[in-house]
Image (cartoon, rainbow, N blue to C red):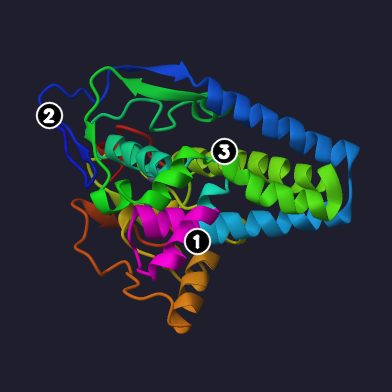
Amino acid sequence: MRLHATDRVYPDNATNAVTGAIRWNAAKSLWLFLMIGGGFAAITLTPSWGGFLVFLGTTAVTICAGHSVGMHRLLIHKAFQTPKWLEYTLVWLGTLVGMAGPFGMIKAHDMRDWHQRQTVCPPHPSHDAGFWRDAWWQLHCQFVLDHPPRFQIEPEIANDRIYQWMERNWMAQQLFVAVPLFMLGGLGLVLWGVCLRVAVSLIGHWMVGHFAHKSGQQGWYVKGLPVQGYNLPGLGLITFGENWHSNHHAFPHSARLGIEAGQTDPGYWFIKILETLGLAHSVLGPHDQPERDGLTRIEPGRNRSCMAGLNGACN
Ligand SMILES: [Zn+2]
Ligand SMILES: [Zn+2]
C-alpha cells in the first residue's frame, strides 16, 4: 500500500499507517477529570452571574482568537501572516484552551490529517466509533502506531524558544488566567474561568470532530478517500466557524472556513479585522492554492452521507 506524505509527516518503507494500539493516556485523562470536577464545583458550589460571564468571555477569546485563528488557521495551516508578536499572542491564547502546547497541537492535527489522506484509515483517527466509545478514545486515550512515520515540525517553529516554553509548560500556562481571577474573585472565579472553560472546550472540540466526520451537509468531497469532512450548519457562532468541516477538507489552506452564502464564520471576521488594522496580510482564500486531487463539487441541496469506504457507491 502506497503511503502519501504531507508537509510534516514522512513515511518510509517501514511505516505502517494501520497497525497500532489505542492506549490510555493518564495525564490527558486526569487533566480532563480535574477540569470536569472543578467545572461541576463551579456550577453547584459557587453559582454566580459574574462567574458565568467570566466563563463566556474567556471561552470566546481562547477558542476564537486562540484555538481557531491562532493555532489552527495560523500556526498549523499558515492561512495568513501576522507580525511575530501577534502570532505568539494568538498561539499562546490557543495554548490556554488547555488541550496541548503548540507542538502537541500541530502533531495531533497533522497526524490525523495524514491518516485521513491514506487509502485505509484506522478507527481512531477517523472517529469510526459510536458516541461514548469515541469520547473515551479521543478524550482519554491516544493511538500509538507500531511503525509510525517520521514527524517533523519546520525548524522555525520547532527551534523557537517561545514556542518551546509554551510546549513545556502548557498546563501551567493556566496560572496566567487563574492567578488574576483568584485575586479578582477568589476560588469560585477560577473554577468558572479555568476549570469549566477547559472542560467545555475539550469536550466541545471533541464533539465537533466526532460529528463533522460522521454525516451532514457537504459542499465538496474528496474522491477516493476513506474519511470525509461534513459541515454542521447552525453551529457557526459557537464554534467560531470550525463547524464548516467539509469546506476545511476541501480547502485546508483557506483562512476562510465559511465560504458559501450564509455560512457564519466569526474566526474569519476576526482575521478580516486584523487585516483592516494592518495586523494581518497574505490571507488565503479557497482558490489561492491548487485544488486537492479528487476534489468534487456537490450541488447545493443534495445531501451525501456516505461513510468510510463507500465513496465509489455513492458518487
Ligand atoms: Zn477532518
Ligand atoms: Zn486543519
- Asked whether 62 falls inside the magenta stretch, the response is no
Q: Count residues near mark 3 (Cα–Cα under 10 Å), then give few for <14, some for 14-19, many for 20+.
A: some
Residue 126 seen from this side = yes
Q: Position of residue 8 (x, y in %)?
A: 24, 43
Q: Count residues near mark 2 (Cα–Cα under 10 Å), then give few for <14, some for 14-19, many for 20+.
A: some
- Asked whether 74 falls inside the magenta stretch, the response is yes
SS class of the residue under badge 1? helix
Considering the whole magenta stretch, tell me its main secondary structure: helix
Q: Earlier in the sequence, mark 3 or mark 1?
A: 1
User: Which range of residues does the magenta coloring cover?
Assistant: 68-93
SS class of the residue under badge 3? loop
Give the labeled residue for mark 3. Answer: 171
- Is 205 drawn above or below residue 137 in the view shown? below
In the displayed structure, does residue 144 sit left or right of residue 17? Answer: right
Residues 123 and 32: in front is 32
- Is 293 drawn above or below residue 225 in the view shown? below
In the displayed structure, does residue 207 sit left or right of residue 248? Answer: right
Give the labeled residue for mark 1. Answer: 89
- Is 288 drawn above or below residue 172 in the view shown? below
> Label 1 to label 2, Cα distance in Å?
36 Å
Q: Position of residue 264 (x, y in %)?
A: 54, 66
Give the labeled residue for mark 2. Answer: 12
Q: Earlier in the sequence, mark 2 or mark 3?
A: 2
- The mark closer to the camera, 1 or 2, is 1
- Check the picture and name the quadrant holding the N terminus: top left
Q: Residue at x 18, y 24 (%)?
A: 15
Amino acid type of the residue tagged 2 in the rendering: Asp
Amino acid type of the residue tagged 3 in the rendering: Met
Amino acid type of the residue tagged 1 in the rendering: Thr
